[in-house]
Image: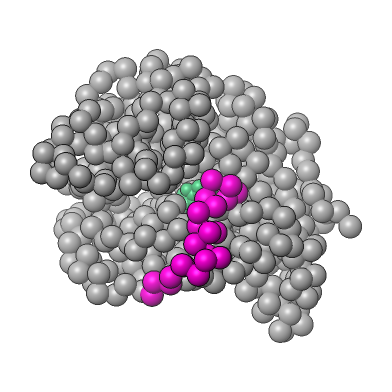
Amino acid sequence: MQTKILLDENHLPSQWYNIIPDMPGPLAPVINPQTFKPVTPDDLAPIFPMAIIEQEVSSERWIDIPEAVRDIYRLWRPSPLFRAHRLEQALGTPARIYYKYEGVSPAGSHKPNTAIPQAYYNKIAGTKRIATETGAGQWGTSMALACQMFGLECTVYMVKVSFGQKPYRKSMMQLWGAEVLPSPSDRTNAGRAILAKDPNNLGSLGIAISEAVEDAATRADTCYALGSVLNHVCLHQTVIGLEAKEALALVGDYPDVVIGCHGGGSNFAGIAFPFAADKATGKDVRIVAMEPTSCPTLTKGVYAFDFGDTAQMAPIAKMYTLGHDFMPPGIHAGGLRYHGASPLVSQLVNAGVVEARAVPQTACFDAAVAFSRAEGIIPAPESSHAIRGAIDEALRAKEEGKEKTILFCLSGHGHVDMAAYDAYFSGGLEDFEYPEAAITESLKHLPKVAL
Ligand SMILES: *Cc1c(COP(=O)(O)O)cnc(C)c1O
């Protein structure tokens, strides 16, 4: 009864899978938020190295992973694929449940899978310094780690409320050599303008993005890095699904359903895209994205052009969106509170290749605790949404008396998020239903893109 299905290091993927050539139809253009014309490589050159800009629009199906990136991946990759025997027994399900565990990275999540190549491409392009933002801190820690490994300086604008509430993530970033600033800061025009109006402003991801982009755009030695949503980020994360597929083949299995949690779409893309490729060639596999009911982008949003950020500085993309000024309730899965979604994932949902489901946070914590008691690993609150999805599929298999194979991505561990579990056990966790009025209002403010 094999529990850990481990690939040897020489089975670390040598190429990422780029889904762009296999998409159902052409990609919608990305629009410059100032000119309202399609974004050109020149628009992006002040903030991204050219290799990243090229990956964003590449039509090559397979893209080589540089050896220097693979050398660092080897510190924790291939990540283990687990067969959840004990969870299956606890549920009494005939289903086989597998999970790909990304919490084994130094930062504790899947995010270093893209932080490492992003730092690498910046390094070889001559970038000296990265400016980025972080909300709860997972992306900031991953970028700090990656910059440390390639000898780049790193400045992280951390949403001020999290800077106060998540001191351990700040310590992790500092340990890996990054400078961490509470945002809004006095370092940028964007930050200073907000502080002048409201010195006690607690910040938001939108403000932090504006600060990091301004920092990168105004310094020749500095570039910007984003941890989700964009095509190149989804590309880098495909190591998750490629390894999972190979490990499953070792035990002669293939999933009937593939499940991931969805915030901006990167870990979901990572586990799902290599299977979506099979589906495009006729394979019968369901692919399900799990999101919170409090921020139901894929299930209740509209598929339309919208700004990537609240401040209307980021490019306009066609995606599922709740409106760029939608403010989701403060749930514990901070990484799932983005108003938009990856344009690639959005197009797949719209085309019916990917299904989406929304679940309330208490049901997710119920699932996380059941998982932890069976399997031991404490999941990140974000990952608990995927666990909920997997458990529901397993319970359905039990009801129907059907064997089936379920694969999900356990995107990270919850060691730095124990405050969320404290809230759960002290009964302080609330469910927020679909915030219909706020979404309706926000959807009135979508930009009008004439193509
Ligand atoms: C950031 C994060 C997420 C959400 O981001 P995606 O881009 O949707 O993957 C999910 N899980 C963990 C552990 C995270 O850190």
Q: Nearer the viewer, residue 199 or 128?
A: 199
Instruction: Left or right? Give the position of 140 relative to 390.
Output: left
Q: Quadrant of residue 374?
A: bottom right
Where is residue 352? Give x, y as percent.
Answer: 48, 68
Q: Is residue 392 above or below residue 374?
A: below
Q: Residue furthest front?
A: 426
Asked whether 6 falls inside the magenta stretch, the response is: no
Residue at the left extreme? Answer: 197
> How many tags in the picture?
0
Q: Nearer the viewer, residue 412 or 27?
A: 412
Give above or below for 402 relative to 163: below
Q: Where does the magenta region start and end?
A: 413-433
Residue 146 visible here: no
Q: Is residue 401 visible?
A: yes
> Which quarter shows the N terminus?
bottom right
Please name the residue shown 74% across and 36% down the image.
11
Using the image, determine if residue 296 lies above or below residue 76.
Answer: below
Residue closer to the observer: 243 or 285 = 243
Which residue corresponds to the image point at 62% horizontal and 45% vertical from the top-left? 103
Q: Position of residue 340 (x, y in %)?
A: 34, 56
- Which quadrant does the C terminus fall into? bottom left
**Which residue corresponds to the image point at 46% horizontal and 57% vertical from the top-left?**
333
Relative placement, left or right, of 181 versus 416 is left
- State the scheme by which the image is colored: one colour
- At x 72%, y 45%, the residue is 80
Is residue 284 or residue 329 the one in the foreground? Answer: 329
Residue 17 percent location from the top left of the image = 57, 43
Residue 282 place in picture, x, y as percent = 62, 63
| Residue 416, magenta (yes or no) | yes
